[in-house]
Amino acid sequence: MQRLHNFSAGPAVLPEPVLSAAREHLLSLGETGIGVLEHSHRGPAFGEVLSSAEGRIRRLASIPNDVAVLFLQGGASLQFAMVPANLRPATATADYMISGTWSLKAMEAAQSDGAVHVASSSQNSSFRELPGPPQCSSTPAYLHYTSNNTIAGTQFSTPPTPPNGVPLVCDASSDIFSRPLDLDAHDLVYAGAQKNLGPAGLTLVLIRRTLLERCPDSIPRISRYVTHADSGSLYNTPPVFSIFVTDLVLKWLEDQGGLSAIAERNRGQASRLYDRIDASRVLSGRVAFSARSLMNVVFSAGSDEADARFLEHCRRAGLVGLKGHRSVGGLRASLYNAQPDAAVDRLLEVIDAFEAEQAQ
Ligand SMILES: Cc1ncc(COP(=O)(O)O)c(C=O)c1O
């Protein structure tokens, strides 16, 4: 079966060598004689997988020892609730920068049981731009932002600056490890694995250990970050297969030369596509130049009907997953780490063919 080029926003394309290796380990993890899905999460074989994944994460992103690495479940959506439950005392406010659907959802989750504050928002521009610098409340427990807006197609090039002493929390679900991560600027970073890290089912949380002291006893034990930090992410059965495949992806990332090297490749792919769209007579990008995401290129052929014809060209050329999110419509090409250059080459050829057809 020939594999297609997958531009889906997530779950998304994974490196082929990773998929092949995962297949081998299904029958026997290394020389253990038991498949990776069959090992106890408390046994030595999985223990090695877990510590290997943590080690690679720490080395790739130069994560200091005062930051705990947690392997959780529940997706980024559970983090929307865990962040305020753990970090916001009853007397404080949770501050949010609103840059798209996901940051709105994050704030909504915090709103259900405490005070929130919109520190800045680009909703007025339908999220075609990034929000301005944050104007925090007088009692911020933290400032939350979404580094890459998967649906709108925008991305922060540098983290925002919170007031002195206010922890910065980042939902990095759609650009984690697509470029170097500045852990000095952040106090908590979370991401669902299913775009740049591995399969769905795993949520990575990087949290400064001083924040663990804030986790209140009044919330269920399983919802407290400190529970997972104290038990080495083994409080309950972790998503063993997702962690295993993520470790393979992290190894692949190391083999690519690490985060700076992958960032360079990601920049190259995105520039080629944006340049082609800019030069096109029939396609146009959705967002402001300065806000463009290197992960999710959102564009349109001008009408629903023209977008549908473009998608048909893609389908015939073996390119899938380019339909825009239903809330914004249009087209979207997701260029996560594992996207091969060949997929972008093919997409550019499709654009040429589509333009030629439109000109007739
Ligand atoms: C930026 C961002 N945050 C959060 C989510 C929600 O993630 P999950 O489905 O893992 O809860 C997504 C999903 O695409 C996302 O792109």
Image: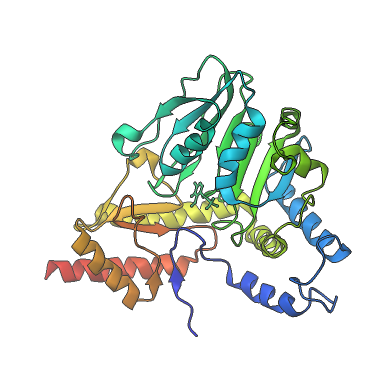
**Residue 125 % position (x, y):** 30, 35
Vertical side of 124 occupied by 232: above or below: below
Vertical side of 134 occupied by 254: above or below: below
Q: Quadrant of residue 114?
A: top right
Vertical side of 25 occupied by 212: above or below: above
Q: How is the image coloured?
A: rainbow
| Residue 219 visible in the snapshot | yes
**Is 323 on the left-hand or right-hand side of 167?**
left
Residue at 49% in and 34% down: 107
- Farthest residue to the right: give it: 44
**Residue 184 % position (x, y):** 66, 32
| Residue 158 visible in the snapshot | no
**Is 343 on the left-hand or right-hand side of 206?**
left
Q: Nearer the viewer, residue 102 or 309?
A: 102
Q: Quadrant of residue 23?
A: bottom right
**Is 71 on the left-hand or right-hand side of 148?**
right
Residue at 19% in and 57% down: 303
- Farthest residue to the bottom: give it: 1
Q: Nearer the viewer, residue 228 or 47?
A: 228
Residue at 82% in and 65% down: 40
- Farthest residue to the left: give it: 360
Total numbered labels: 0
Image quarter of the C terminus: bottom left
**Residue 142 % position (x, y):** 59, 26
Residue at 57% in and 16% down: 139
**Residue 211 % position (x, y):** 71, 30
